[in-house]
Image (spheres, helix red, strand yellow):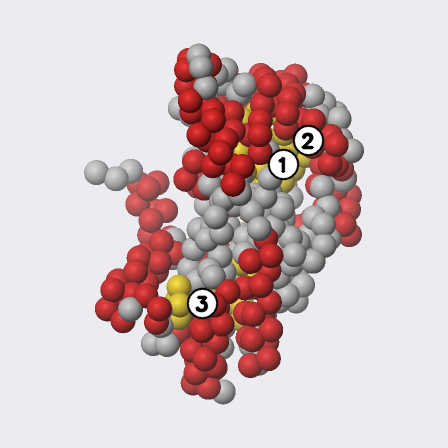
Amino acid sequence: MLSEKMRKLQGEVVCIRDIFEEGKKMAAVYGAENIFNFTIGNPSVDPPKEVIDAFVKYAQMKPYQAVHGYPSNVGYPEVRQRIADYLNRTYGTNYDFTGIFMTVGAGTGITSICNMILDPDDEVITFSPFFWEYKSYVGNFRGKLVTARCNMQTLQPDPVTFEAAFSPRTKLVLMCSPNNPTGAVYTEESLKAIAAIMEKKQKEYGHPIYLISDEPYRLLSYDKPVPYTALYYKNTLTVYSYSKTLSIPGDRIGYVAALPTVDDYDDIKLGMNGSIRWIGLVNAPSLQQMILLDCCESCVDISIYKKTRDILYNGLTSMGYNVIHPDGAFYMFMQALEDDDIAFCEKAKEEKLLFAPGTAFEGPGWVRIAYPVPPEMAERSLPAFGRLYKKYR
Ligand code: PLP
């Protein structure tokens, strides 16, 4: 018997996984090469060689208990030190290893923070369109997710809708850049505007408002570097994941990072330790932590995703589709050719094109194209997009 909460969630979500599974069934009938499945963000580029080498090396390392036993709840000190050193060298920060908390990917990084900070009915602001799972990450702790619409011409946060979303119950802001589902990379100007509004609201309400910077796509940026959020706003909690940058989403490893200057730093350290344990994670997988000693700076070959991005963006816009240029991640947001994006996705299936309706991300009238697919598949899909366009125009 499902709980009321679970039934409600399942009823609400336009299930992207279902569309993906439907694509697999279509592939069995029509042949995989004739189905163009752009529904989910499962990395297609192989992990770097050093990642696989590290798995083999550390799995065999003796004594076995040092790698396969329980580490402390927030992770191995030497791994956290290695990550702190990397961040400090790369972004000019001053992380201490005690401010790095190893997590089971970004999903549980965000969940652990929500568990640590939220009381029932506290509010978390995020920018819409947004990654749908944020609803559960927040709702699990009876928090309320409040959305602030982005500027739909640029897909950057809109300072006006953002400021209007605050209330005295706002405890967290949750942002993602490079963004899922839009592919937008938030500019320095956007980060400065977010920071200024948050500083103002912290003063007004007299309590810290933490900014969760969800960054699983940080290294997947094709045109320009991604500004480091924590340098713009003092109370940033950075959530990172190796799922996409090392192509190991099934291995579930990431971290939360807090600079020593965040408000209530000692409480945050205690809170993260308890939170990871109390939500039942106990600790991030120990072997996956250890491999980071050798490859926490690595990244997959992003030139492949860039190639696919360029084929799709150039091909679709030259046909007449409205796509906002995606600078990062492996998603692009395209305007549907009718108001009803769900109906548009159904029509696309007739051409064996599968992608997710924007409604699934609170972006009605748009669709998300997830493109971690081989460039040649993207190329072959263009005639199908052309036929779809002709049905409407
Ligand atoms: N946040 C965003 C924006 C994502 O797209 C994803 C996964 O797709 C996650 C968090 C969860 O990532 P992880 O696999 O690291 O838990």
Q: CA distance from mark 1 to mark 3?
A: 30 Å
**At label 1, which amino acid type do we have?**
Glu
Q: Earlier in the sequence, mark 2 or mark 3?
A: 2
Number of numbered tags placed on the structure image: 3
Q: Position of residue 104 (x, y in %)?
A: 47, 31
Label 2 SS: helix
Position of 297 with respect to 60 (left or right) is right
Asked if the residue under mark 2 is in contact with the one under mark 1, i.e. CB atoms within 8 Å, the reply is yes
Residue wearing tag 3: 377
Q: Which quadrant: the N terminus?
A: top left
Numbered disc 1: secondary structure = loop
Q: Earlier in the sequence, mark 1 or mark 2?
A: 2
- Residue picked out by circle 1: 297
Q: Would you call the spot at circle 2 few (<14 residues within 10 Å), some (14-19), or many (20 or more)?
A: some
Give the amino acid type for the residue marked by disc 3 in the picture.
Met
In the image, taking residue 160 as reference, residue 212 lies left or right, namely left
Q: Which mark is residue 325?
A: none
At x 58%, y 34%, the residue is 295
Q: Secondary structure at mark 3?
A: helix
In-front residue for pair 62/266 = 62
Name which residue lies at 56% across and 75% down.
315
Give the spatial CA distance, label 2 vs label 3: 36 Å
166 left or right of 141 in image: right
Pinpoint residue 146: horizontal percent, then vertical percent. Answer: 55, 46
Ligand 1 within 8 Å, label 2 CB? no
Bin the neighbour count of mark 1 within 10 Å (Cα to Cα): few under 14, some 14-19, many 20 and up: some
Residue 189 in view here: yes
* Residue named by callout 2: 86
